């Protein structure tokens, strides 16, 4: 017994190292699976409020740009209100029947922390479960995509940016509706990879990739980016391309969270099919 | 270790954590370089810091930075690894008792050569652990390796600049 004690005392440095290193590795790997855990929520709130204060200061430096974005957005919305249309048939807009349902709702939120320089990038926004945000909701800016919500605390939400190794967006070519996947391999935050393009598709530089709407995260037709390069592999079944993201991830100020009002219905339908 | 040293180390701790969280984490040069200057705290801990204290301090330091970057465990693991290596590095590169002059490792007391070896080895250990744990796959080995080397160089530059500013040579 005494020998054991002496042994531990002599080598305590190694044991302490192993203990602390194991704790941090366990935290590191668990954190990927249980992002909603208690510890996480607490530290989320602390760092959220500190980042919020600092952001309140740094916000002034980008006022000019924010104004421009807001004006552009206002113009876009103005062109959509009923008054902007020439009404050929008043019934189209005022008919309260069951044919037209609201499918998507948008919650606007402010980005309070954001990275583009890591291999896995996340943003934090200042709206949370109290404002109706839930996991797996899409996040967009204007008509461009940003990422999806992965963790929610009462006042803040954590958003996995498209610039993440776990991010995989289902997109399609605007010109012919062919489905592809968009990913990001690290490095330059402006450039992503387009995977699994069927061989027979003729690509050109500048082709627009939009969201497909297949994943129930984003509505259909949001712009992801444009093709900036591609390779025609001879021996494989699919070609790969390089995409220039339309979103400038380094200057996100205010974003919108997409609430799919029919998601529950879609998921239930899927689930009921599986159980049969 | 006097209470004055402890006090200065605590101040330095908070300063470096906030400096890292609020300013350096937003810096990204060329898509490869992210400086992690906060480890300067571990480099500057006094020689007579107990070994267990070294590990605990590194653990708390990494944890504090992790809270701000939302990567719980990542910086913590890298910092603990670095603190573990510190005593061995000091033993390995010190030739005689005269190289351990003064309370804390510094460019002024130990000389440029000693300090360069000391900081390069420890910074690379930290960055290597950090970047490879972040990626956690070998398919991007070379890209990550370039990130490790370029970021280490940048962190080293910051460390040397601070050494020259805080401890100017000559009286």
Image (spheres, rainbow, N blue to C red):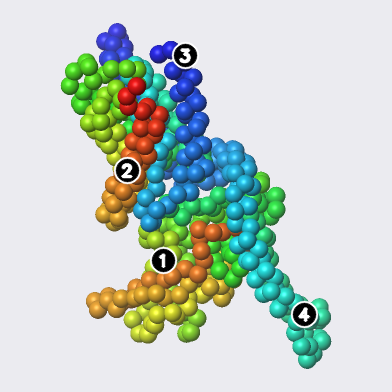
Q: In this view, does B31 lie above or below B51?
A: below
Q: Where is residue B135 in the image (x, y as percent from the top left)?
A: 36, 50
Is residue B78 visible from the viewing direction of this image?
Answer: no
Q: Nearer the viewer, residue B100 or A204?
A: B100
Residue in the image at 63% along x and 52% along y: A60
Contact between marks 2 and 4 (CB within 8 A): the answer is no
Which residue in the protein does label 3 denote?
Answer: B3
Whole-number angstrom distance, CA of label 1 to CA of label 3: 52 Å
Which residue in the protein does label 4 denote?
Answer: A82
Whole-number angstrom distance, CA of label 1 to CA of label 2: 25 Å
Mark 3 vs 2, N-terminal side: 3
Q: Residue A191: which disc?
A: 1
Number of callouts: 4
Q: Residues within 10 Å of mark 3 (few under 14, many from 20)?
A: few
Q: Which of A113 and A165 is in front in this view?
A: A113
Contact between marks 1 and 2 (CB within 8 A): the answer is no
Contact between marks 3 and 4 (CB within 8 A): the answer is no
Q: Residues within 10 Å of mark 2 (few under 14, many from 20)?
A: many
Q: In which quarter of the image is the N terminus of chain A?
A: top left
């Amino acid at each position: 017994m005494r020998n054991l004690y002496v042994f531990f005392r002599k080598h305590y440095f190694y044991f302490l190292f192993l203990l602390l290193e194991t704790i941090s590795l366990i935290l590191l790997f668990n954190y990927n699976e249980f992002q909603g855990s208690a510890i996480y929520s607490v530290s989320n709130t602390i760092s959220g409020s500190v980042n919020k204060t600092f952001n309140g200061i740094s916000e002034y430096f980008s006022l000019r740009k924010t104004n421009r974005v807001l004006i552009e957005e206002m113009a876009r919305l103005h062109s959509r209100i009923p008054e902007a249309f020439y009404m050929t048939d008043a019934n189209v807009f005022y008919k309260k029947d069951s044919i037209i349902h609201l499918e998507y709702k948008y919650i606007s939120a402010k980005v309070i922390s954001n990275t583009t320089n890591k291999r896995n990038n996340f943003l934090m926004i200042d709206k949370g479960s109290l404002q109706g945000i839930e996991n797996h909701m899409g996040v967009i800016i204007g008509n461009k995509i940003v990422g999806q919500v992965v963790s929610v605390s009462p006042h803040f939400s954590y958003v996995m940016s498209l610039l993440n190794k776990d991010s995989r967006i289902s997109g399609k070519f605007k010109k012919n509706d062919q489905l592809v996947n968009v990913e990001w391999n690290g490095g330059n935050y402006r450039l992503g990879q387009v995977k699994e393009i069927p061989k027979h598709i003729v690509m050109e530089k500048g082709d627009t990739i939009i969201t497909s709407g297949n994943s129930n995260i984003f509505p259909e037709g949001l712009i992801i980016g444009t093709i900036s390069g591609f390779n025609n592999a001879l021996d494989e079944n699919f070609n790969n391309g390089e995409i220039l993201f339309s979103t400038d991830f380094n200057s996100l100020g205010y974003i919108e969270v997409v609430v799919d009002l029919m998601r529950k219905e879609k998921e239930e339908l899927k689930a009921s099919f599986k159980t049969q | 270790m006097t209470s004055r040293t402890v006090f200065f180390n605590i101040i330095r701790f908070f300063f470096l954590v906030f400096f890292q969280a609020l300013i350096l984490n937003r810096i990204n040069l060329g898509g490869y370089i992210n400086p992690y200057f906060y480890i300067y705290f571990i480099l500057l801990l006094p020689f007579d810091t107990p070994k267990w204290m070294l590990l605990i301090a590194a653990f708390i330091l990494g944890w504090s930075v992790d809270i701000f970057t939302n990567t719980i465990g990542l910086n913590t693991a890298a910092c603990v690894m670095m603190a573990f290596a510190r005593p061995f590095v000091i033993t390995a590169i010190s030739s005689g008792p005269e190289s351990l002059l003064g309370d804390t490792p510094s460019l002024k007391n130990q000389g440029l050569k000693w300090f360069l070896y000391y900081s390069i080895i420890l910074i690379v250990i930290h960055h290597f652990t950090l970047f490879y744990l972040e990626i956690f796959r070998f398919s991007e080995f070379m890209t990550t390796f370039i990130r490790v080397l370029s970021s280490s160089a940048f962190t080293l530059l910051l460390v040397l600049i601070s050494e020259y500013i805080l401890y100017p040579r000559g009286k």
